[in-house]
Image: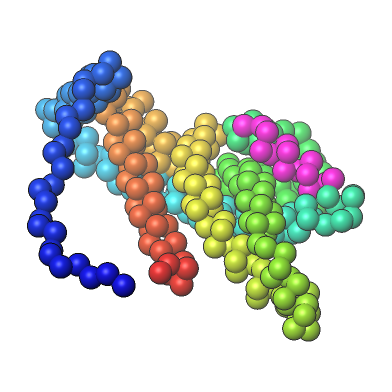
């Protein structure tokens, strides 16, 4: 065994080498400077063109549209989650008929635009008005708000089903084998062991899907639903001021940013046992 007889004297920190200015770095700096200038001009335009009369007149309408947007998204996400679970189970099923039907549903609603689905529900189902009146469902399909809710629900259900299916399949098979070795019934093992782990895996994709649905919900304004974008269109038609759309963009950006931070906090809270 050897022993150190003298201490190594402290050494100065290594000298930082200046990075050379390459063409890519120069282009990046110019790009960032351009967007910074554009943002400054935009802020100046908003401050310079501030009209308190328009704000007091259309501000309550913006708040009403914001409430409509949030309620549409919240209800459609919950209903879509309830619908996505049986769809995901059907996709994982060994029954070929169930697997094929769920695959066709998910393939169609993920492969077509939300706007086309909205038109199919709002305009397409109107063709069957006599049949819908006969079964007492016309009250639902004649209302634009309900049609928007239905279109958003069936759309997000397809995305959530694929997210959940992938999350369930990502859980190691050894978890199922361990539950079977302990004599735990398959349904109990799935509900208390597999599904909680799958939800943790699916948490971030779920957040992305909700954010996409918030931004996609603006299409319901086309069928006369006075959500945030619908109220913005109304304000623009009365003022012809482009800042009405700028305020709508600020509202959407605020919602998305708040949801992003909330989802990050939820993820940190639920995965704190996985961190060391």
- Whether residue 102 is visible, yes or no, is yes
Q: Residue at x 34, y 48 (%)?
A: 257
- Front-lying residue, 155 or 5: 5
Quarter of the picture holding the C terminus: bottom left
Provide the residue span drawn in magenta: 100-113
Across and down, in percent, residue 19 comes to 21, 27
Q: Is residue 239 magenta?
A: no
Left or right side of 237 for 115: right
Figure quadrant of residue 240: top left
Q: Residue at x 32, y 46 (%)?
A: 254
Q: Indicate whether 115 appears above or below 171.
A: above
- Whether residue 84 is visible, yes or no, is no
- Front-lying residue, 266 or 110: 266
Number of numbered discs visible in the structure rendering: 0
Left or right side of 24 for 197: right
The furthest residue to the bottom: 183
Across and down, in percent, residue 267 comes to 44, 61
Secondary structure predominantly adopted by residues drawn in magenta? helix
Q: Residue at x 83, y 57 (%)?
A: 93
Left or right side of 226 for 83: right
Q: Residue at x 47, y 68 (%)?
A: 274
Q: Indicate whether 47 appears above or below 56.
A: above
- Front-lying residue, 108 or 17: 17
């Amino acid at each position: 065994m050897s022993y150190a007889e003298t201490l190594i004297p402290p050494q100065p920190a290594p000298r930082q080498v200046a990075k050379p200015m390459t063409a890519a770095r120069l282009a990046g700096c110019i790009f960032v400077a351009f967007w910074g200038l554009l943002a400054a001009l935009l802020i100046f335009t908003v401050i310079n063109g501030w009209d308190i009369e328009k704000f007091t007149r259309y501000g309550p309408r913006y708040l009403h549209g914001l409430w409509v947007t949030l309620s549409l998204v919240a209800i459609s996400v919950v209903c879509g989650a309830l619908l996505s679970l049986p769809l995901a189970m059907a996709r994982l099923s060994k029954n070929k008929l169930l697997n094929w039907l769920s695959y066709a549903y998910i393939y169609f609603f993920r492969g077509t635009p939300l706007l086309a689905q909205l038109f199919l529900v709002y305009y397409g189902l109107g063709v069957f008005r006599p049949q819908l009146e006969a079964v007492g469902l016309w009250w639902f399909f004649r209302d634009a708000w309900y049609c928007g809710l239905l279109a958003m629900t069936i759309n997000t259900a397809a995305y959530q089903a694929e997210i959940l299916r992938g999350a369930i399949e990502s859980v190691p098979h050894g978890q199922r084998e361990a539950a079977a070795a302990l004599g735990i019934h398959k349904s109990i093992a799935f509900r208390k062991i597999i599904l909680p782990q799958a939800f943790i895996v699916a948490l971030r994709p779920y957040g992305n899907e909700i954010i996409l649905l918030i931004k996609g919900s603006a299409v319901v304004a086309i069928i006369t639903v006075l959500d945030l974008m619908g109220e913005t269109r109304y304000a623009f038609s009365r003022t012809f001021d482009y800042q009405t759309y700028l305020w709508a963009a600020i509202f959407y950006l605020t919602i998305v940013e708040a949801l992003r931070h909330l989802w990050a906090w939820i993820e940190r809270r639920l995965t704190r046992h996985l961190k060391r």
